[in-house]
Image: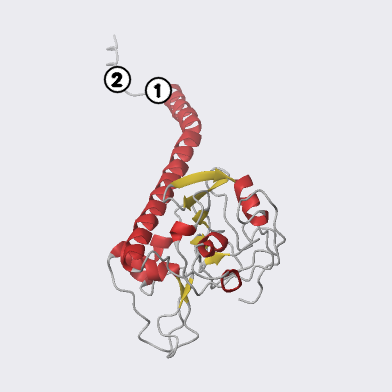
Amino acid sequence: MKPHPKPTNAFTLIELLTVVAIISLLISILMPSLSRARDQAKGVHCLARMKDFGTGLASYENVNGDLLPPPLWNPAPEEEPELVYGWTETLFSYVWKDRVSRPSDPTRPHLPVQRNVHPDRYENYFLCKASAARGMHSGHYRVYLPSWLMGHARLDAEERYDIANTTLNPWIAGSRSAIPPRMPIIGDANEQSEQTCTSYINAGEANTAGTAGYNGNRFSDRHYGGTNYLFQDMHAEWRRSNFRERLSTDVDLNGIEDVIIDDASR
């Protein structure tokens, strides 16, 4: 008489396939939730970065007589007039407590305005983690120029800007205390902007589609169909895309649509 085979603890093929099917089903159920959680974490990180900018601006103001850094900046205008940076380079030393310097090699092409002159160390600081494309000029944070220049209370209207003609001077600095609290001062920039060397969004540009329908120099709605902004009172907040659309027509948010002529000179 043959002895009975000893029982084993191995899975049968049917049991193995059943386990694989259950795991696959659980993954398919959990993946959307995990993706949303990841997107939410990126949005929260972006808002925290905005608050960092607010801290840096407050430090800058304390040293510079209640003035914001200029949207455009040249560290050596007499030596290298073509060298153009932006508010981020000026603000950088107040955020990181690190000195901003010019490139030492004159043959080296200058970096885009949105990055510090040491990109290998700090280039991601001014880039949103949720940006789909992180190329030469994508996913940066940019200032909303109409808000930024409302702070020129010490200048007359002609020197400051004329909203009807968008005669905005990005090379001068204004005071944050003169900006209405409802106005955003920094926001998520579009990933595919055509403007490769700018650090601001001009009047009327907040919702510009661009030549390809998606590449305008505008605010991005990459966070759940909306944009993260830093406001005048230094609080960071997510706003829906209709707020971005309003910024492009009612540039001072006073309830009256403005006649916009985009500044194409830069």
Q: Where is residue 47 in the image (x, y as percent from the top left)?
A: 42, 48
- Residue 104, located in which quarter of the rendered image? bottom left
- Residue 263, located in which quarter of the rendered image? bottom right
Q: Residue at x 44, y 54 (%)?
A: 129
Question: What is the crowding at mark 1: few (fewer than 14 residues within 10 Å), some, or many (at least 20)?
Answer: few
User: Residue 265 versus residue 157: which sits nearer the camera?
Assistant: 157
| Total tally of numbered discs in the picture | 2
Disc 1 designates what residue? 12
- Can residue 170 be seen by looking at this rendering? yes
Is residue 13 positioned above or below 236 on the image? above
Q: Which residue is drawn at 66% across and 48% down?
A: 255
Whether residue 2 sits left or right of residue 67 in the image: it is left
Q: Where is residue 74 in the image (x, y as percent from the top left)?
A: 44, 80
Question: What is the crowding at mark 2: few (fewer than 14 residues within 10 Å), some, or many (at least 20)?
Answer: few
Q: Report the residue that reaches farthest toward the bottom.
A: 79
Instruction: Tell me the quarter of the image containing the C terminus.
Output: bottom right
Could you tell me the amino acid type at mark 1? Answer: Thr
Is residue 69 positioned above or below 251 on the image? below
- Can residue 127 be seen by looking at this rendering? no
The secondary element bearing badge 1 is classed as loop
| Residue 29: mark | none
| Residue 8: mark | 2
Q: Report the residue that reaches farthest toward the top.
A: 1
The secondary element bearing badge 2 is classed as loop
Whether residue 244 sits left or right of residue 8 in the image: it is right
Q: Disc 1 vs disc 2: Cβ atoms closer than 8 Å?
A: no
